[in-house]
Amino acid sequence: MSKIKIEFPDGTEKEFSIATTVKELAASISNSLAKKAVGAKFNGQVVGLNHQLITDGKIEILTKDEPAALPILWQTGAVVLGAVLQQLYPKMYFGESNVTEHGFFLDTDNREGQVAETDFEKLSQHFQKIVKQAVPLEEVEFDVQAALKLVGDDPYRKELINEQATANQKITAIKLGDYYDFSVKAVLGNTSALKVFKLLSVAGAYWKGASSNPMLQRIYGTAFFKQKDLDAELARQKEAHERDHRVIGNELDLFFVDPKVGAGLPYWMPKGATIRRTIERYIVDKEVADGYQHVYTPVLANLDLYKQSGHWDHYREDMFPPMDMGDGEMLELRPMNCPSHIQIYNHHIRSYRELPLRIAELGMMHRYEKSGALTGLSRVREMTLNDGHTFVALDQIESEFKKILQLMVSVYADFDITDYRFRLSYRDPANKRKYFDDDEMWERSQQMLKSAMDDLGLEYFEAEGEAAFYGPKLDVQTKTALGGEETLSTIQLDFLLPERFDLHYIGADGQEHRPVMIHRGIVSTMERFTAYLTEIYKGAFPTWLAPQQVAIIPVNNDLHLAYSQKLRDRLVGGHVRVQIDDRNEKMGYKIRQAQVNKIPYTLVVGDKEVAADQVTVRKYGEETTTTMSVTDFIKEVTEDIASYSRE
Ligand code: ATP
Ligand code: ZN
C-alpha cells in the first residue's frame, strides 16, 4: 500500500502517498495554511508538523490561532530546553517532559551539580540561539536496541524506552540536533516559532511521581506566539503568587508543613489556629441554630466498620493501611466520618418524629493522598471536615436538600464568597464497577438532584464520573489562586449506607422504615477552607476572622504604656484580639509592620490621646487616620466584628 486516504473536516477525501508529513499535507492545500500550521488532529490525536501519516484517517490541521496550538509550542519548548541542557551539562540525565496548563516542564538529574534559577540567563541565551537557527525537529523511529544505545547510561530515558517497547515494537523519539526526547508528544516542525519564551522556575519532582523514586529537578518554562500573551501570563503568575496561601501562610506565620515530620500533616501556628477556631465556632453555632446536633466520635475504628460501609472495597487506595494490633484486632484511621455518625443514629431506636435527624461534627479524618498532589493546606493527609449527615424519610429528601443549600448560601454570604459554580456529579456510565451497583437508585437520585436544582432556579453544570461511590452529589466548585478549581461544599445523597447498616426508624404506622442519608459539608475541611479564605482575602482577613484585630502603638513607652495597657484590657473585655507593640522601634516602623501583618486597626497613642481618653485609628490599607473616644472605637470595632463584613 503506497497511498493513504485522508478525510478533511468538510467531508472531502484526498489520496496522499504514504509517509506524507502533516506539513507537506498542509502545503498541498495552500501555502498560507502551511505557514500557519502548527500540527494536526489526526484520528482524534494531536500530532506534530513532521509527523508522518501512514494510515487512512480524518485530519484537521491546527493553526497558531487555535487553543490547541499552545501545547504544541510548549512541548517544542521542552525539547529545546533538553537540547540546551545537554549542550551545557553533558552528564545530565533526562526524565519526562510535558505540558501543563500554563507552559512546559522537563525533569532532569545532573550528577555534576544542580541547575539553579541563576543559570537561567545562560540557558536562555543558548535557547535563543537554537530558536534563531530554526533547527528542525524530527520524529524518528528506532528498534529498542538502537534507542537504548543512544541514551547510554541515562536510567530515566532507558525506562521511557522500555515502556514504549512493551506497548510497541518500534521506539519513537523527537530528535533535535543530537538530543532525543522519548516522551514523544506533538511538536512544531522547527524551532523558529519559539521567540517569545521564558524559563520560570526549578522545583523537585519525584521520578514518575512516586516518593519511593529519586527526586529529580523539574525545570519549568513557558512560551507564546506573541509577547503580549507572555506578559499577561507573567502578570497572572505574579498575582497568583501574591495570593498563594502557602506564601501568605509563611509571611503571616499561619501554618507550616514539614515533610521531614510528615508530608501533608500541617501544623497550625497560633495565628492560623485563631482563624481556624473562629471558623469552627462560627459554623458550629450556625449549624446548631439550624437544627444540627453536634457530636464527637473517634478517628480510629475497627477495620470491620469500613468493610461494612464499603470504604474498604471502594476507597482503599485513599486510606492509610490498617494497624495490626497483634491480637487479631485491626484498627483503621477513618477516611470519612459517615460510618461514625451511623453509629450515633443506630445507638437508639429512632422514630419518624425525630426526622430529619441532623448529626454534625468537626470530624478529623485521614486520607493517603498522593505525595505529588499535596498542596499546602488545600490538599493534606490529615484534615478536619465540617461534616454532617442528615437522616431523612424518602419524602423529606427534597426539602432537606433545599434547606442545606440555603444554609450554604447564607454561610457563603457571611464569608463574602461570590465566585463559585454548582456541579451535579454523576457516576461514570462507562465505569459502573467503581460505584454501588443499583441502576435504579442512581437514575432516581441523579434525577432528584437535578429537579431540585431546577426548582430553585439555580444554574449548574453536570459532570459524569465525579460522584461518590455510594451516590450522586452536588458540589460547589470554587477557583483557586493558581487558576485551578476545587470542591468546597458538597451535598450527597446516599441510599446505600442505610442499607448496609440496616438503618430504620419507626414510622407513624408503627412499622420499620429505611431512612435515606444525606452527607453534606458546608465549609469543607478546616484546612482547605482556611487556604481558600487566605487566597480570596489575600491575607487581609475581615476583622471577625483576623488573628489580631487591633494593634496599639504607644508613641513613647515611658509616657504612654500604662494608658495603652488599660486600653488593651478594655478591648480584651469586649472580646477584641489586641496586642500592644511596645518594642523599642521607631513608630513609623511599627505602623508599617502592622500594615504588613494586615491588622485591621492600628491605634496610635500619644499625649493628646492620653489627655482626652481618645485613640487615633488607622484602618488597614488606608492612609488617613481618625481620632475618636475610646468608647466610640470599642463600639465601632465590636460592631465590625459582629457584622462579618469585610469593609
Ligand atoms: P476531592 O475531589 O477534592 O479529593 P472528595 O470528593 O474526595 O474531594 P469528599 O469525600 O466529598 O471529597 O470530602 C469532603 C470535602 O473535604 C471535599 O469537598 C473537600 O472540600 C475536602 N477535602 C477532600 N480531600 C481533602 C484533602 N486531601 N485535603 C483537604 N481537604 C480535602
Ligand atoms: Zn459522609
Image (spheres, rainbow, N blue to C red):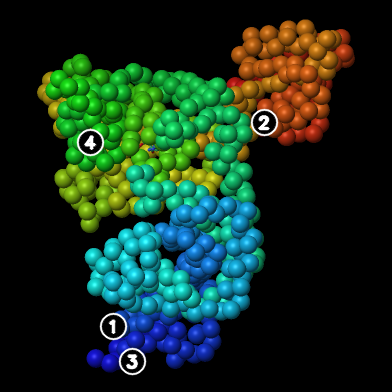
Residue 633 visible from this viewpoint? no
Disc 1, SS: loop
Q: Distance between the residues labelled 4 and 2?
A: 43 Å
Residue 507, position as x, y percentages in the image:
17, 23
Marks 3 and 1 in Cβ contact (< 8 Å): no
Q: How far apart are marks 3 and 1 (CA)?
A: 10 Å
Q: In this view, does 18 lie to the left or right of 578?
A: left
Residue named by callout 3? 17
Q: Distance between the residues labelled 3 and 4?
A: 56 Å
Q: Point out the frontmost of discs 3 and 2.
A: 3
Residue 83 visible from this viewpoint? yes
Q: Is mark 2 within 8 Å of ligand 1?
A: no
Report the disc number at residue 455: none
Q: In which quarter of the view is residue 438 placed?
A: top left
The one nearer the camera, 615 or 302, is: 302
Q: Which amino acid is tagged 4?
A: His
Q: Does the residue labelled 1 lie within 8 Å of ligand 1?
A: no
